[in-house]
Each structure stands twice: as C-alpha cells, then as structure tokens.
Amino acid sequence: MKPTSKTIVLSMILLLLVVSSWIIYTYYSQSPAQVVLLVYTPPVVQPLLNNASREYMQLHPNVRIEIIGGATGTLLNKILLTGEGDVFVTADHEYMLNASRMGLVVNESIKVLSYVVLALIIPKDNPANITSLDDLVSKDVKIGIANPSVAPFGRMAVELLVKNGIYDKVKDKLVIYGDVGQTARQVALGLVDVAILPHVAHYWYLNDTSIIWLNPAQLPLMSCQMIAVLNTTKNYQAALEFVEFLVEYVRFNPYPLENGYVGDLDKISSITPYRLEELLFNNACMGYVK
C-alpha cells in the first residue's frame, strides 16, 4: 500500500518535533547552569544598580541578578535573619564596617562604590521659598528625612542639623519616612516643603524637584556607599566578578555621572559645586578606593 500524502506530512512533522527536541536538549544540557545572585542595596544606589544589573546580565546571560532594596539597617537585619545573600551594598561606611565586624562580609572584597553629599531637595516650584538652612528655622515648614535608626542618610541629616545648632529648633518640624526613596517621593509630590537627602535624589525626579547646595562648612563628615561579597554566598567568584564590574561601571561608564553618581573623587566637582578639598570624608572611604 502506498503511503498517502497525509501520512507523509504527519511523518515529517513527527520527525521535525524529534529533531527540535534533540537540539533543545543538547543546547541546554551543554549550557552552563544559571547563577542567581541576591544583591541587597539601599535606595540611594538602587537606580544605579538596576541599570548596571541589566547591562551585566546582557553580558553574562548565565547570571541573573535579583535586587532587594531597603534602608541599610533593615537590609542588615534581613541578612542576619535569613542567612542568605551574595552581595551587600551599604549607604555609608559605618554599616559596612559593622557588617565586617560581625563577620557577614568577605573583608578582602570591600570596595567603595560611590560618593554623594547631602543637599536640600525642594519641590520644583519651591512653594515655601526655601533658600538656606536658616529658612528651616524661621519658616513653618515640613522637613522630610529618612528614618535615622535604619537609614544612614537620615542619621546624617540629623548630624547636619546638630552641627549647625538648629536641631532643637526644627525637630518638631521633621517628618520621618522609612528610607531615602520614600522621602524623595514625598518631596517630589509636594507633600513636604523640603527634604534633607543625598544629592542624587534630585536626579530621580528632575522634573519635580530642585536642589539647594549647602555651604561646605555646614556639611557633616561625608560618607560613601560601599559594596562587598557576603560570606553567605554560594557563588563567591560570580559575586566577586559582579562587585568588580559595578565598581568599574560607576567609575567609567557615562550613565552614573549623568545621573549624579560619583565613583571617582576627582570628579566630585563635575557634579557638585564643591572642590574636593572642601569636603571631609571618613577615612574608611579613602582606604578602599583602590
């Protein structure tokens, strides 16, 4: 009996399915297993991490980056509770040094990621007509800051007010939010008159906010954002390679500088009105620069 046209077509389809299945099986069985890196990051650098991670995953299709955001203190507690994670980014040096003392990070992997400075961020139309720290005292305004107990830039905001002798005069005007990201959203929406935030927060809402730079003598001791591999990682080499990629990315890729992030202190004056010698950074931020 001669095969019908229908039988021939069905046979060809079956053959194609078998060949396709074999090709797919061969490809995936020979491809490297996907590595998942869990990265904890504070809001101050999360936009930067989001962009860099996308680029990294395009370059390394076998690596998937999962980012968990939150105030640095909250993230530290989460790492302690879960015992999970591969990379830890902190909004300041103190939390990284604490993580080091607690044995949570691989000390040899600690590096400086970026430098930012405090500024006054105001709604675009500046309804309260704020021009300086003095206005925080003399005017009836709402002042947004991040929670000082878990957010380093909230703590630094308080340090700034204390240094300039106005904390007791304005403490009842403070509106506390969970982290830097939440605080920045409130000022962009005009729900507070001013916020004391890292200068990069202005870049997140360029169309909705303005920035007021302070006199360098008014600024507290500056900090830096730091990054390290966690001791809980099961993929040390992959985590270290991602850390090294991020450090180079911030220093040499145009995106970070275009969005307010400074990875090299020599470039601080290209983003801020300050000369490097006008700013005081903690020694920890200098020791891991190279």
Image (tube, helix red, strand yellow):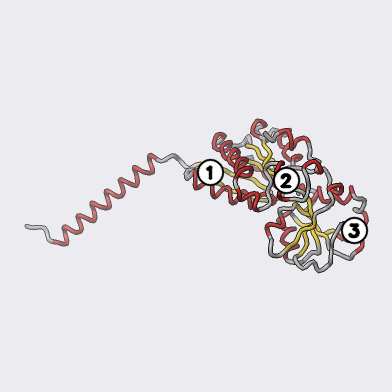
> CB of mark 1 within 8 Å of CB of mark 2?
no
Q: Quadrant of the N terminus?
A: bottom left
Q: Of the residues shown, which amino acid type is indicated by label 1? A: Val
Tag 3: Cα neighbours inside 10 Å, few (<14), some, or many (≥20)? Answer: few
Which residue is identified by label 2?
Answer: 268
Q: Secondary structure at mark 2?
A: helix
Q: Amino acid at mark 2?
A: Ile
Residue 170 location, x and y as percent?
90, 58
Which one is closest to the eye, mark 1 or mark 3?
3
Judging depth in this view, the residue of 52 and 101 nearest the camera is 52
- Indicate which label's residue lies in the foreground, 1 or 2: 2
Q: Is residue 104 left or right of residue 121?
A: left
Looking at marks 2 and 3 on the same chain, the residue that comes earlier in the sequence is marked by 3
Asked if marks 1 and 3 touch (Cβ < 8 Å), the reply is: no
Q: Quadrant of the C terminus?
A: top right
Residue 129 shown left or right of residue 104 in the figure: right
Identify the amino acid type marked 3. Answer: Asp
Mark 2, mark 3: which one is toward the viewer? Answer: 2
- Indicate the quadrant where residue 85 lies: top right
Q: Residue at x 69, y 57 (%)?
A: 203
Of the image marks 1 and 3, the number of the one nearer the N terminus = 1
| Image vertical order of residue 237 relative to residue 135, above or below | above
- Locate residue 223: give its quadrant: top right
Q: Tell me the CA gap for discs 2 and 3.
A: 26 Å
Residue that badge 3 annotates = 134
Instruction: Give residue 132's mark.
Output: none
Q: Is residue 76 visible?
A: no
Percent position of residue 13, x then y = 23, 56
First in residue order: circle 1 vs circle 2: 1
Between 17 and 253, the residue placed more toward the observer is: 253
Mark identifier at residue 36: 1
User: Which residue appears farthest toward the left when viewing the image?
Assistant: 1
